Image (tube, grey):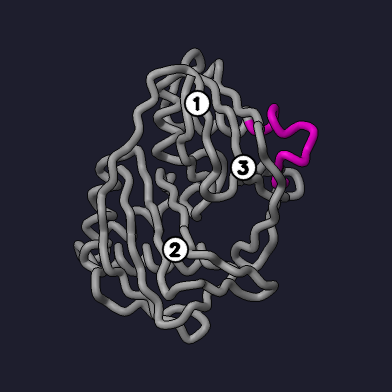
Amino acid sequence: MNIDLQFTTKNGRLPLDYRRVMLSFFKKSLSEIADGKYFAKYYCCPERRNFTFTVNFPQPIFSKSEITLAKNEFRVTFSTVDSNIGYVFISAFIAQIGKKFNAPMGNTYILKNVVQKNEKTVVSDSMLVKMQSPLCLREHNNEGNKDRYISVADNDFESKARDIIVAQLLSEGFSESTVSKTAISPIDAKKTVVFHYGTYIECSLGVFAVNGDKSVLNYLLKSGIGSRKSSGFGFLQFIAEG
């Protein structure tokens, strides 16, 4: 399910860590329906959050400390492969229409409209996509409890990306035979550094080729790709297939 959220703002200033602000909005939305049981389900339990989102700004200007918008508005696109999750979130979002949401930098966001959008279905075993939100690939090392973030600047990008994506697909119930041909290759991509929860993490932006079983490709299109998807990373824009 693909859901478009249209916001207006009191002023055109947003923090660099805007994904964290949107997560606060999601949590507030869920906490105010069904006596908060869905907030508890998705944010208090270790259950995997099978959704992603991207934020679209009108002609943004980025500085070292904030983002300035050309207009006092922005859009969020929320996507999930799970229709049950989609219906819960769209109900929560609709309940927030017209309400003020207090945000950093003396700002206020108001959700003006919620629209369910049509989704693309892939029928072949390859697709060309553009990252609408950065591709985050996190490799956790239990020894030392450290994380490594991998981008297209790393020589082992393709092999590490495949390992991480395949492991996630297997955890979601795909069989080893189904995910065996899964691969991702940069076509016109670059490294970027993203400020998230008080730290800078290495990610990738640009155009990629993704290969694999069509069930896998359709799953990735709707649920996102890579790590930290539910925090606003890995949102795919479909370009072409075959």
Horizontal side of residue 99 vs 184, given as left or right: left
Which is nearer the eye, 167 or 99? Answer: 99
Residue name at image x 67 percent, y 72 percent: 63
Q: Residue furthest top?
A: 177
Q: Which residue was labeled with disc 1?
A: 127
- Looking at marks 2 and 1 on the same chain, the residue that comes earlier in the sequence is marked by 2
Q: Which residue was labeled with disc 2?
A: 23
Contact between marks 2 and 1 (CB within 8 A): the answer is no
- Looking at marks 2 and 3 on the same chain, the residue that comes earlier in the sequence is marked by 2
Horizontal side of residue 226 vs 72, given as left or right: right
User: In which quadrant is the N terminus drawn?
Assistant: top left
Amino acid type of disc 2?
Leu
Residue name at image x 64 percent, y 33 percent: 161
**Res 31 → quadrant:** bottom left
Which is nearer the eye, 193 or 128? Answer: 128
The magenta-colored residue range is: 148-161
Q: Is residue 86 above or below residue 22?
A: above
Q: Is residue 45 above or below residue 236?
A: below
Q: Which mark is residue 206?
A: 3
- Say what secondary structure mark 2 lies in: helix
Amino acid type of disc 1?
Met
Pair 2/1: label in front: 1
